[in-house]
Image: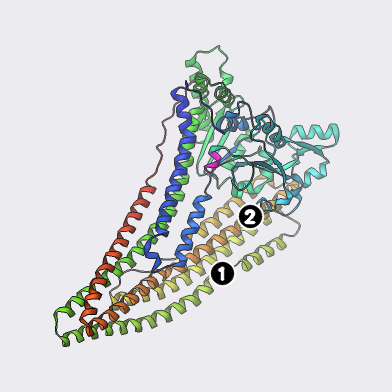
Amino acid sequence: MSIHISNSASNQAEIMISNLSTKINEYSQWRENLIATIDAFIDWSGHAEALNAIQVLRLYDIKEVLKKDQLVLAFLAEFSRGKTETINALFFSDFNQRLLPSEPGRTTMCPTEIFWDAHEEPCIKLLPIETRSTDDTLAYLKSTLDVWHKIRLDTASASAMKETLHALVQKKEVPLETAKKLGFWNEDDPSMIRLLAEKGMVEIPVWRHALINYPHPLLKNGLVVIDTPGLNTMGAEPELTLSIIPNAQVVLFLTAADTGITKSDMQIWTDYVKKRAAHKLVVLNKIDILWDGLETDAEVEALIQKQIKNTAHILDLDAENIFAISAQKALVAKIKKNDALLKRSGVTFLENSLADLMVSSKHEILGRAVVTTCSNMIQSSNKLAQIRVSSIKNQLAELHELQNKNRDISKAILAKVVAERKRYEASMLTFNQGSEKITKLSGKLLRHLSSGYLNTTLAQTKQDMGDRWTTVGLNKSMREITRLASNLAEAISIEGRTIKKHADDLYHLFQRKHGFEKTEAIELDMSKFIKNMQALEKVTAEFCSNPANILTEKHFLIRRFFLGLGVQIQAVFEQAQLDCNLWLNQVIGELKDQINVHKSALDTRAESLMESHNSTDKLLENLELAEKELAKYQAQSNQLDAILLKLMHCVKFSPEKPQATITS
């Protein structure tokens, strides 16, 4: 499938192409370049002689992270703000009609994730709403294939696609008790009250969650679009607020020019966007209502600027992050290839900022983490290459000295190297004893983060809450879990400092006795673990302080929030355990590699000197061999320098921020 733009497209339309397609393509290429650089390091010839299995596995893990990397864009809005129409205009205009259902009133009835997975055929998967009555989280259900209703997508037919995707808005009527059980009853919703009075039933969505696997070019490059329903449904799925939305690179919050910022708009902004989303843009949609032909272009522009200014003031946001558009006119303009209408719709500037913000925010996080980890590995490998180079230079000097000195002096040179090797073996004994002590301490440290401990804690918390499921109990439980986590982090940090002290003693030993480079073991940092737990505590406190969640009817929601919270806590603990494991592998890993390389080099020097001491022919042969080995290891070091330089070039990728203006 291709995005169709006429040959007569204006510069604005060309900018439109570059905004999303080109910049996301550039980001995809950046990932590929980074993967190629990592492959070059994995294939580095020096690994063949000193293969660090843990390091190589870590590199393969990083490659998998890069390959599966996604740019997540979440759309949040109350119903009737044109959110789905905006998605159609941004991503699906090439179908020359509306693809996702977009009609007046409520359209998106369930959270919808749009992405591409090449391992599966194009399809839509729908999760029955009845799954809300179970304790199963969305994260778990995504791995349970048999609970989803799957429909194949016919991507060759726009009309067939549209018909299939209409399932997203399916609704059904259920008794009041069922609606309450599933968390849908809202006594403040006039339409619900009216239907209950007329039919004795309540209208709810047929589906709880939707997954659309669709081979769009942008989705193939890692873009994921999340379309969320309005305020009522948002509140009933805590996982959206605990993980899905916070993990998005950009949140697009939509308001409408015909309604202004309503009470429900403000609640979505305050509860789900303002403090939760690191990167956010606000869309003031439906500006075409101002195009009634009674005002001049200048007067319309002034009205738009006034709306932007008022919206910025109400939301306490910089006006440059607010974009006035007409999603409906943008979709029409793209379908009809109307460049003037496209320009007037204002969507071009939104696309430009959206692409830049998504790419730059993800690049900042992913690039820094990957490049830092890989550059440290490359530099460590280069140290090993330099140890080999230095040792061979010493070996050459000794062999040349043997060549020019008498037999007695030759014996002295040999004795010196043999004595050095014996001192090294004594230090090796000390290292092995210290390493064994560190291994025992490591096991004790990791037990703090065991799944058994966490599961017991969560089970006890759930038991303490019983059937009450109150916000007071939930808030108290989360504070207690955070307190326990802080105590754990402190205990782990203390044990980490003990391990570091033992490791530093070993580093200093080899520095003092054998001339190793002066360095110390890296410190164990538990701040990320604490920060993540405190963030969950803050989210819980905000949830519990919301008056809407204190009502008796919200016990369903409180229970679901706790279950979602447990998944997030588990993820935080698992990440902390992974980080601690990585640290424990690194704390003396670099020193261990250097010791092994140094010992191998010493053994080679001693063996070469012994052979050369007894045979002139062997001396000449070893001189020639050492020269070749020196050239080889110097070449390996140069290869690493080139790989590191390429890695540094990768991190320099950074899109320029656009200067947008609003055109009426």
For residue 604, side relative to residue 30 (left or right): left
| Residue sticking out furthest to the bottom | 408
Q: Position of residue 39 (x, y in %)?
A: 43, 55
Asked whether residue 271 is drawn in magenta, I would say no
Compare residues 658 and 191 and report the one nearer the observer: 658
Query: Can you give x and y, in whole percent of width and height, for residue 262 in the image?
Result: 62, 31
**Horizontal arrangement in the rendering, residue 591 relative to residue 475 (left or right):** left
What's the amino acid at mark 1?
A: His
What span is colored magenta in the figure? 218-224
Q: Are marks 1 and 2 in contact (CB under 8 Å)?
A: no
Picture residue at 51% right of the left edge, 54% below the top? 64
Label drawn at residue 565: 2
User: In the picture shown, does residue 479 fall above or below 513?
Assistant: above
Which one is in front, 315 or 247? 247
Mark 2 or mark 1, which is nearer the start of the sequence? 1
Please indicate whether residue 633 sits to the left or right of residue 454 in the image: left
- Residue 393 visible (yes or no): yes
User: Residue 92: where, in percent of width, then height?
Assistant: 59, 31
Q: Which sits in the foreground, 363 or 451?
A: 363
Q: Which residue is mark 1?
A: 448
Rendered image: mark on residue 253: none
| Mark 1 neighbour class, 10 Å CA radius: few under 14, some 14 to 19, many 20 or more | some
